[in-house]
Amino acid sequence: MTVDHRQHHLESLRGALSVVVYPLQWLVDLPGSTSEWFRESLATRRELQEDNAALHTQLLMLNSELQKLESLEAENRRLRALLDSSFQVGKRPMLIAELLSVDMDPYRHQVEINKGSLDHLFEGQPVLDSQGVMGQLIHVGPFTSTAMLITDAAHAIPVQVNRNGLRTIALGTGAIDRLELPHIPNNADIRVGDLLVTSGLGGRFPPGYPVAEVTLVEQDPGRAFSHVLARPRAMLDRSREVLLVWPEELPQPAPAEMTAPAGTPKTTEDGPPESP
């Protein structure tokens, strides 16, 4: 022991003995280590399954939130464009509304919005979007209103060519992407690509707001008028938010004249009633 403690001559012997004894130690520890391995394996599998389920749920929630954010981002872009377009209307009062439903009748182009008479809307009020004129209100209820689009076959709007001021009427054709400009002489200065804007005549639509773009001009020498078609600037089949504007001064009905019954004396400004 003294020689081993001082000079470490038995190190090689102890190493050889440890190699011989190791299999015995491994066999003795095998049952315990095996049971521990099974227990850890089962616990790890259960934890992995729970973690997998939690991560799957979290992924679904995050995907749902991402879709909501994408929808909000798209709505934000539409509202920004709509608010930017409101500067073209000037200082007129305005209100943003959302579409509730679309009339599926192929012969009528009408939509319903979520604003009504409680928001001071009135029949004939112009409806716009971020690109141009959409139409006008034809029915106003307390909470909802119905708007007729400019492409409805029963709709007409006064317009003028932005390039030269040529005035005409844009009629709805029943097609969502087409307007007709009737009674334009063959010698009129109108070209494909001309921008049509509201003329402001009648005081219903604000002047200078985009309506459509000329897409076809056919001049037949055998006819007195040209065949002219235009495509609406407003996104009639895609807009979800609309802009409602008011005229600068709403027309007030004239008071009815008071008529006195026959035989009743009339009063004068400076004196008592005149004798009949």
Image (cartoon, helix red, strand yellow):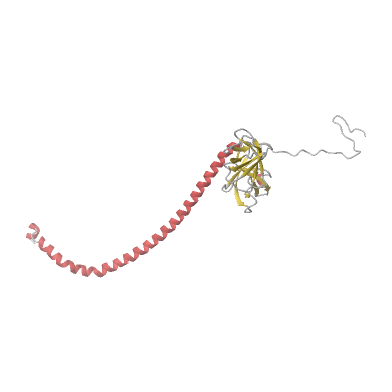
Q: Relative to the observer, which residue lies in front, 75 or 267?
A: 75
Visible residue check, residue 49: yes
Question: Which of 154/257 is in front?
Answer: 154
Instruction: Name the residue nearer the viewer: 130 or 264.
Output: 130
Q: Is 22 displayed left or right of 120 in the figure?
A: left
Locate the N terminus by quadrant.
bottom left
Evaluate whether residue 117 shows in this view: no
In the displayed orientation, state which residue is furthest to the right.
276
Q: Quadrant of the C terminus?
A: top right
Q: What x and y, as percent, mark residue 11? A: 11, 60
Q: In the drawing, does residue 195 fall left or right of residue 258?
A: left
Q: Is residue 246 above or below residue 41?
A: above
Residue 6 in the figure: left or right of residue 169: left
Q: Residue drawn at (18%, 68%), measured in percent from left and top?
A: 23
Q: Residue furthest front?
A: 222
- Quadrant of the image occupied by residue 120: top right
Q: Residue at x 55, y 43 (%)?
A: 79
Q: Position of residue 2 (x, y in %)?
A: 7, 60
Rendered location of residue 62, percent (x, y): 45, 53
Rendered view: 23 above or below 99: below
Q: Residue furthest top?
A: 270
Q: Is residue 261 left or right of residue 163?
A: right
* x and y, in percent, of residue 202 in the image: 69, 38
Q: Quadrant of residue 242?
A: top right
